[in-house]
Image (cartoon, helix red, strand yellow):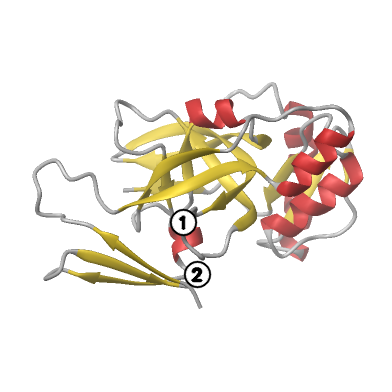
Amino acid sequence: MAHVDLEWDPFRSGDPGPLIDVVVMNSQGVIEAGRAVGLEYPAPLKMKALLDSGASVTVISKRFAEYCRLFQTNEGSEISAIGAIHHCGEHAGSVSFPGTNLRSFDPIRIVSAVFAKERHYAILIGRDILRNWKITFDGRDRRIMIDD
Amino acid sequence: MAPNAAFAIELAVFDQHREEWYRSHPGCFVAIQDGVIVDGFFETYAEAFNAGLRKFGVQRGFLVKQVWATEPVYLVS
């Protein structure tokens, strides 16, 4: 059983929310099949992700989805965010959590959308991943505990 | 849904079968490339994707789509 302990002070001015390091890349199946036919893929890139219980699915910035060359499996899906509808892509990728023993998700559907002026994170970890964990917020110690 | 050149053929195939598939396998996933549909319905996105990967490979994208009567909207709040 995996356990992760994260610092999070939601009372600090400008706090973006609880963040965790992630690596997003193509599914191992895509990479193996692609390399067998001469395709190349960028090196894995560690990014910050927001643990977002308000997101029904995991969402990546379109810019990073393009950088990672995530294998696309749909286009034109809709995200409703703060009253506005955004059109988005869907990709098959993998999400892992470096420096922890949380299990990886591979393959998993990752939705891509344009993030406007967001400097703190490149990914929203949505309920499709959160539903697999037990998450506790300790407001006194200002920590988040994740048990997988 | 937004105009979509990348998966126009696949989405048209999906729409042709949507009602029939929704009656028999609501909520399941299918994988489609051009007019070719991977045999079977899949309980999860991952199963459908892996089946599509085995059939189509990675040279071109393929559609993986859940069978609903209407298009779902993902909520981010």
The 10 Å Cα crowd at callout 2, few under 14, some 14 to 19, many 20 or more, is few
Spot the residue most to the bottom.
A1
**Which amino acid type is marked by label 1?**
Gly
Judge from the rendering whether residue B50 lies leftward or rightward of residue A96; answer left or right: right
Residue A26 in the image: state x and y as whole percent: 66, 41
Can residue A95 be seen here? The reply is yes
| Image location of residue A34, percent across then percent down | 81, 35
CB under 8 Å between callouts 2 and 1?
no
Question: Residue at coordinates 48% horizontally, 73% vertically from top-left?
Answer: A2
Say whether disc 2 or disc 1 marks the residue closer to the N-terminus: 1
Q: Hey, which quadrant is residue A122 in on the image?
A: top left
Label annotation for residue A99? 1
**Residue pointed to by mark 2:** A132
Q: On the same chain: label 2 and label 1?
A: yes
Q: Give the mark toward the camera: 2 or 1.
A: 1
Residue name at image x 86 percent, y 39 percent: B57
Q: Is residue B70 visible?
A: no
Q: Chain of mark 1?
A: A
Crowding at dot 1, Cα within 10 Å, few <14 / some 14-19 / many 20+, comes out as few
Q: Can you say whether B53 is above or below A61 in the image?
A: below
Front-most of A77 and B48?
Answer: B48
- Which type of secondary structure does the marked residue at label 1 adopt? loop
Residue occupying image coordinates x 81% and y 43%? A32
Residue in front for this viewpoint, B44 or A26 = A26
Tell me: B40 left or right of A142: right
Q: Quadrant of residue B36?
A: top right
Counting every numbered tag in the picture gives 2
CA gap between label 2 and label 1 equals 19 Å
* Disc 2 residue type (three-letter): Asn
Query: Quick check: A26 above or below A113?
Result: below
